[in-house]
Amino acid sequence: MKTSLTLLSKNVRAVLAASITVSAFAATPVLAQEDTADTVDNNDVEKIAVVGTRAAPRSVGDSAVPVDVISDEEFKNQGSTDMVSMMQTVVPSFNVNEQPINDASTLVRPANLRGMASDHTLVLVNGKRRHRSAVITFLGGGLSDGAQGPDISVIPAAALKQVEVLRDGAAAQYGSDAIAGVVNFVLKDNAEGGSIEARAGEFYEGDGRMYQVSGNIGMPLTEAGFVNLTAEYRTSDPTSRSVQRDDAAGLISAGNTFVANPAQIWGNPEIKDDIKLFANLGLELSNDAEAYMFGNYAEREVEGGFYFRNPHTRGGVFDGGTNEDGEALLLVGDLDGIDQGISCPDVVIGDNVLQSPSYALIADNSTAVGANCFAFNEMLPGGFTPRFGGVVTDMSLVFGTKGEFANEVGYDVSVNLGQNEIDFAISNTINPSLGPDTPMSFKPGKYIQSEQTLDIDLTKPIDAGLYEPIYLAGGFQYRHETYESIAGDPASYAIGPLGSQGFGIGSNGFPGLSARSQGEVSRHNIAFYVDAEMYLTESFMLAAAARYEDFSDFGDTLKGKLAARWQMTDSFALRGAYSTGFKAPTLGQSNVRNVTTAFGTDGELIDRATLPPTDPISVLKGGEQLTPEESTSMSVGLVADFDNGLFMTVDYYNIEVTDRLSTASGIKLTDDDIAQLLAQGVSDASSFTEVSFFTNDFDTTTEGVDVVANYSMDMWDGETKYSLAYNWTSTEVDQASDNISPYRVRMLENNLPAVRWSFTTTHETGDWRFLGRVNYFGSIYEDHLDSALDIPKISSEITLDLEAAYAFADNFEIAIGAKNALDEYPDENTLWDTEVAGAQYPVTSPIGINGGFYYVRGIYTF
């Protein structure tokens, strides 16, 4: 099969093989491959090997910008199975945490590269832009609030040949979103052989049991092509690291025996039937042309916990306000209507409303008063805790052709189709306004993100009398996006007969999207780019790029980049880059409607509506049309390659982003606000306690240092490899409007570890392989309960990962291992008194809250 390297002239092949910079500047990256030794001398390719792999290099020293190249083996040799968690293990500047109770974030977890939001990283597959997830992270720990990035968890590790992580601003090459960098997942392209892997594991606590089976096979497609197929199936049980809530314990002490223990579950959600399918095909059409096609289908069901609804205090369900004496009253519905027929008595709650004589009157349905007067305590005497989740479906198809014309002009023309759908589900809850007729499970609606892209990329080496030919690239892109909202089942948003009596409207916890709010919005954009790379001398390389994009909904932009690399001595090289970038507001951010349950600014559980910034409610509170985020990025680094085999890269980066997009902190609606909106015909204005909307409301400066080092040596009748990966990141909010609270600023600056590093050692001898990895996570402030609680800092932590493998034959290996082998937990929440809401540990701790995880896996290759 002809690769893009073999389609270029001999001199250009040498340049591309020796420098990954082309992958940072060309529209279709030409990636460092294991087989580059067949084309150029090994000394021309600077590599830093990864522990546990014999495949592609970890970093490429000849690049003008920092690029990590991670093999498929490194992903496999760890306890994590979800791609997001796998990336965190191998890339220290890539951060992700668990999302035990966090609305849609539980379904698609946000991940952060180099301290930026999850949608500031552009994701590619085989060099082609990956479509976004339909999930918008409404509760993202401050930093990722409102982000809408791709769902990389649908990519199975078994399908990967390698992964490149470009840790530098790249919007001038790839377009919107590449502010923090680019992650490119390269699919396997073997025409023969394959593997089958089965793994199982569980946490030391005995929960969270996981089973996974995956397989990959390569087959010929005639004599001139390949078909490579991958399938993966996974299930994972939920976990619980909860203690009984203080309010729930108080209810039990007062005699309410219907309250669950624990009333609220903090832990990993249940993953049901997680199916991932990937296919990669290629066919040589001639000596100078080939066709390719790849795509995926994935589907998984997720269900997790939610907040406990106290049977005395939950607003819109149980809380009826107070009487003249200041006594708390139960919310009682008059089924025949207020002032119509039989009236209902006031029910004073006291320590246990179930023991109240007035409650006994309405709970006795054999009487006229009892039959007419209704409280949800009759259905749910111990309160209730909803179960929230949904089904995520993802699919894509990319096809195209690439090759070279007779005049050495390379081409790549492709069409890219992608779609992601989230079908929400919530159970063990009610629509309070429907009273006793409410169902207890709902389908609140769907969001669908669809994208179609046409790419035309051209390349040309030009001999200008320099040390190497100038490598020129340019191209055109057309992209069309659609964001569709589909209404939930009618009961999930119905305004029932009790809605006028103070009972909440819609499925409690996640009200359904109403029929009048559903719809479809779309936009398109066109882009032109050009870039060049040249070696002015044997030791000095210079590269430049520019990109123009025009969006149908907010206008055009022009961005650029300059990069250079100087080989100072045989052992040391200096590299650096400067670029401007942007991120366009997504269609979801501009148009989504959502209501979520969160802890408000006063610490109470409330319904917070996220509305389009141009909605009348948003406009009343300061909302306006969104504009793109703008960025400037610079990096400077040192590459060291010593004769003793030690290889090291040290890179400093600085990213300034203005007009950053985020959701505004929750804004309370006053009685006057509601009256004004109702007068304007906004009928649902009284349904929300707080509102939020997307806004360009703050500027930040993020700086950091990445260090990657590797050394290998022969010892103990085998080979031992050492690898260090270190990241320091600091973010400061330069300015923010009143919509961004001081507590949100704290989360933006301190919700991720300032320092993360991992030191990995592997030793291979005979049929044995051993791995040890020490991980350090710096301290953070947690966004506890999505609110502005004044909580202490979470201490730094160190964890240890271990794995041992034995090859019983050339094609069969058994591995056992443990992630967080010493069973480390973050600081307990006991110091936080009643504000923990039943969480034994800070739930977004970088090391997780579940403790040690052990696993076994068997791998058969053929």
Image (cartoon, rainbow, N blue to C red):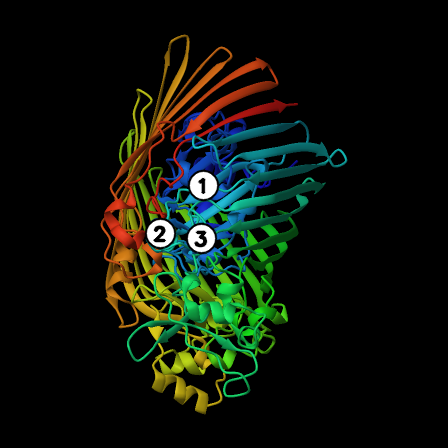
Residue at coordinates 48% horizontally, 85% vertically from top-left? 682
Residue indicated by mark 3? 259
Q: Earlier in the sequence, mark 3 or mark 1?
A: 1
C-alpha span from label 3 to label 2: 10 Å
Label ID, residue 253:
2
The correct choice, above or below, for 861 with respect to 810 in the image is below
- Label 2's element? helix
Instruction: Judge the density around disc 1: few (<14), some (14-19), many (≥20) Cα neighbours within 10 Å.
Output: many
Distance between mark 1 and mark 2 Cα atoms: 41 Å
Q: Which of 269 and 416 is in front in this view?
A: 269
Residue 229 is situated, as x and y percent measured from the top left of the image, at 67, 38
Q: Nearer the viewer, residue 816 or 102?
A: 102
Q: Where is residue 699 in the image (x, y as percent from the top left)?
A: 28, 65
Neighbour tally class for label 2: few under 14, some 14-19, many 20 plus, Cα within 10 Å = few
Residue closest to the eye, 73 or 321? 321
Could you tell me if residue 28 is visible in this image?
no
Find disc 1 in the rendering and name its residue: 85
Say whether disc 1 or disc 2 marks the residue closer to the N-terminus. Answer: 1
Quarter in which the C terminus is drawn: top right
Work out whether mark 3 precedes mark 2 in sequence or the reverse, and give the earlier one. 2
Question: As displayed, is residue 439 above or below residue 45?
Answer: below
